[in-house]
Amino acid sequence: MKLALFDIDGVLANDSHRVKYALDRQWFKYFDKKLMAADKLWPQGRALVDRYAAEGWVIAYLTGRREDRRQVTEDWLDDNGLPCGRLVMRSFSDSMPLANFKERYIRNVVARENYTDVVLFDDDPEVIRFVQEQVGPAHAIHCTWHVKEKPLVKLAKV
């Protein structure tokens, strides 16, 4: 079996209308449930999920969103007709950099589950760099249809 992990914000969800709050570090506003529910679906992300699902990959979602946003995230995935799959979110108390969070999850999946391939699709170049460096180049692919603002990339660093 093969596992395709998809980031949500910037890869599947067009969060452009919320990015200004992230840049100002207004995280509660950025993760406002009504604003998140209003995210449009990136067509490029949709095409990627559909392609991997059609090829028989197990689809899962690995996001920096926190557990207290699980319901709005599940509703958004469902409302946009995305395939069912495991949704991995951060605990509210988790303060580790995003790159570390995603790398640790991928390492655990590779070590504990019976997948022949595991790949992460993410829009954050720092997350991609770190996962490729720590786990291997084939485990992370940079999605570039939504260019991450430089200050946000710095926040993902280890």
Image: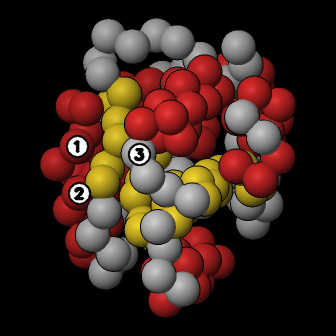
- Under circle 1, the secondary element is helix
Residue that badge 2 annotates: 74
Q: Point out residue 41 in the picture as x, y percentages from the top left corner.
A: 48, 72
Q: Viewer-proximal residue, 147 or 157?
A: 157
Residue that badge 1 annotates: 70
Is residue 35 among what the camera can see?
no
- Residue 94 higher or lower than 90, as above or below: above
Q: Residues within 10 Å of mark 2 (few under 14, many from 20)?
A: some
Q: Residues within 10 Å of mark 3 (few under 14, many from 20)?
A: few
Q: Point out residue 148 in the picture as x, y percentages from the top left corner.
A: 74, 44
- Under circle 2, the secondary element is helix
- The amino acid type found where label 1 is placed reads Arg
Residue that badge 3 annotates: 113
Quadrant of res 134: top right
Q: Point out residue 19 in the picture as x, y percentages from the top left corner.
A: 59, 42
Q: Residue furthest bottom?
A: 54
- The amino acid type found where label 2 is placed reads Glu
Is residue 157 among what the camera can see?
yes
